[in-house]
Amino acid sequence: MDAAHPRRRHRPTTVTEIMRRDFVTVPARESLSEALGTMRMARLRHLLVERDGKLAGILSYRDLQDREIDRLAGGVAELDPRSPVVVEEAMMTSPYVVTPSTPLATAASRMCQLRVGCLPVVVPEPEGGRLVGVLTESDLLDAAYADL
């Protein structure tokens, strides 16, 4: 233990040490209105989208806002429970991902460069990545300031 910082503990260095293992996913064929309800109820800004047990994409609150702006401009269907518009029509396909062994500095730098609020954590497999967690801005801030 450092005498100058008696409460200092191990500083995490990889994604696996701070990623969230409990996360919310939605199926790609779920309606946008249901996804919005899930986001509001769980107080989330991002939903990980799964198809056949694999990461299919990510839906952000910004994606929903952009969709609504397009609707108001006359470009797309309204976010209505009866509407056939589904998550896969608005989500970001092929989102940027990290693996559990990715260094935190690399993940943080990638998030800043890409201007994204989270990165899905996947274990590479031949037929796509198996989703094992998510790394958020909040997780990085918590890790950076844990000693305070």
Image (cartoon, rainbow, N blue to C red):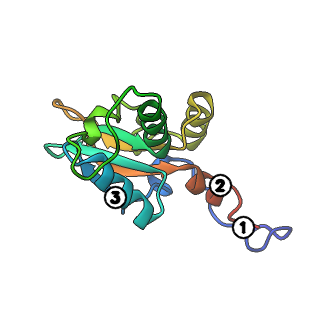
For the residues labelled 1 and 3, the Cα–Cα distance comes to: 32 Å
For the residues labelled 2 and 3, the Cα–Cα distance comes to: 21 Å
Residue with the most extreme right position: 4
Type of amino acid at the residue the image marks with label 3: Val
In the rendered structure, the answer to whether residue 109 lies left or right of residue 135 reads: right
- Residue 41 higher or lower than 134, as above or below: below
In the rendered structure, the answer to whether residue 46 lies left or right of residue 1 reads: left
In terms of depth relative to the viewer, which is nearer, 111 or 37? 37
**Residue located at (53% from left, 40% from top):** 103
- Can residue 8 be seen here? The reply is yes
Mark nearer the N terminus (1 vs 3) = 1
Q: Secondary structure at mark 1?
A: loop
Residue 142 % position (x, y): 63, 60
- Residue matched to label 3: 24
Q: Which label is found at residue 8? A: 1
Mark nearer the N terminus (1 vs 2) = 1
**Residue located at (72% from left, 66% from top):** 147
Q: Secondary structure at mark 3?
A: loop
In terms of depth relative to the viewer, which is nearer, 13 or 133? 133
Type of amino acid at the residue the image marks with label 1: Arg
Type of amino acid at the residue the image marks with label 2: Leu
In the rendered structure, the answer to whether residue 23 lies left or right of residue 51 reads: right
Q: Residues within 10 Å of mark 2 (few under 14, many from 20)?
A: few
2 or 3: mark nearer the eye: 3
For the residues labelled 1 and 2, the Cα–Cα distance comes to: 16 Å
Q: Which label is found at residue 141? A: 2
Residue 57 % position (x, y): 32, 37
